[in-house]
Amino acid sequence: MIIDRDTVQGTPQWMALRTGNPGASNFDKIVTTTGKPSTQRQKYLYQMVGETLSGSKDETFKSSAMERGNELEPKARQFFQFSTGLKVEEVGMCYPDELRRYHASPDGLIVDQNKGLEIKCPLIPTAVEYLLGGKLPTAYVCQVQGSMMVTGCESWFFMSYYPGMKPLIIEVERDEKLISILKEEVERFCFDVNELVKKLK
């Protein structure tokens, strides 16, 4: 794993590194948890091709709920460290190797234990839904398993945080079968991006 500790998440430099580079938060646009191609694959493929050719990232809409989530994330990370006793390191990007064809941008790494952290700060009905579910929501399975695929981490913590409510903190183990499918499909996706870029240049 290659860890970029110099780039700060959310900065223009970080956005530039993500341009045309598939990330774990979008792996569900490539493949589903059942291993089938996602219905969003072609659109995401064209997006990555377009970003690579133009060198610019499409402005993505940020709702007030997303802005709120970004603002709450540092508090959630602090709470996680306090409640678990684990030291979380903030990093910019992680790549599986020197080729840097795809990446993960974790909300934190627990480097001494080879683990990672994904934080979500949803609106209150969703926070209650996650608490009642008591497990990793299906919507984030590809992201969490994909983050472990990229980093090689042994497990990944998922935290759903809403101020004043009990948080959901669970440790997710590696699903080697899904990780194998993700690796194959993401690498095929990167190949397809390159082929289309060559064709359109």
Image (tube, rainbow, N blue to C red):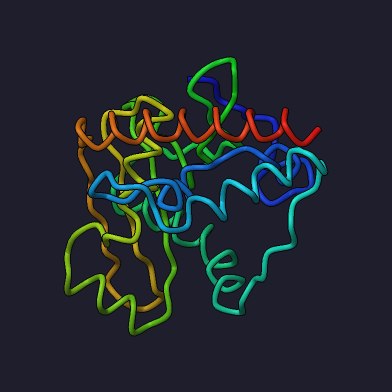
The relative height of residue 46 versus residue 20 in the rendered view (above or below) is below
Residue found 59% across the figure and 24% down from its top? 100
The relative height of residue 42 versus residue 168 in the rendered view (above or below) is above
Q: Is residue 166 left or right of residue 195?
A: left
Residue 136 in which image quadrant = bottom left
Residue found 53% across the figure and 30% down from its top? 94
Residue found 75% across the figure and 48% down from its top? 11
Q: How many marks?
A: 0
Estimate the x, y position of residue 191 in percent, counting from the top left: 55, 27
Which residue of the protein is positioned furthest toward the bottom in this rendering? 125
Residue 18 in which image quadrant = top right
Estimate the x, y position of residue 198 in percent, counting from the top left: 72, 28
Q: Is residue 170 left or right of residue 46?
A: left
Estimate the x, y position of residue 179 in percent, counting from the top left: 29, 33
**105 or 166, which lies in front?**
105
Estimate the x, y position of residue 62 in percent, counting from the top left: 65, 71
Residue found 61% across the figure and 79% down from its top? 64
Q: Is residue 175 left or right of residue 125?
A: left
**66 or 54, which lies in front?**
54
Q: Quadrant of the C terminus?
A: top right
The relative height of residue 35 versus residue 158 in the rendered view (above or below) is above
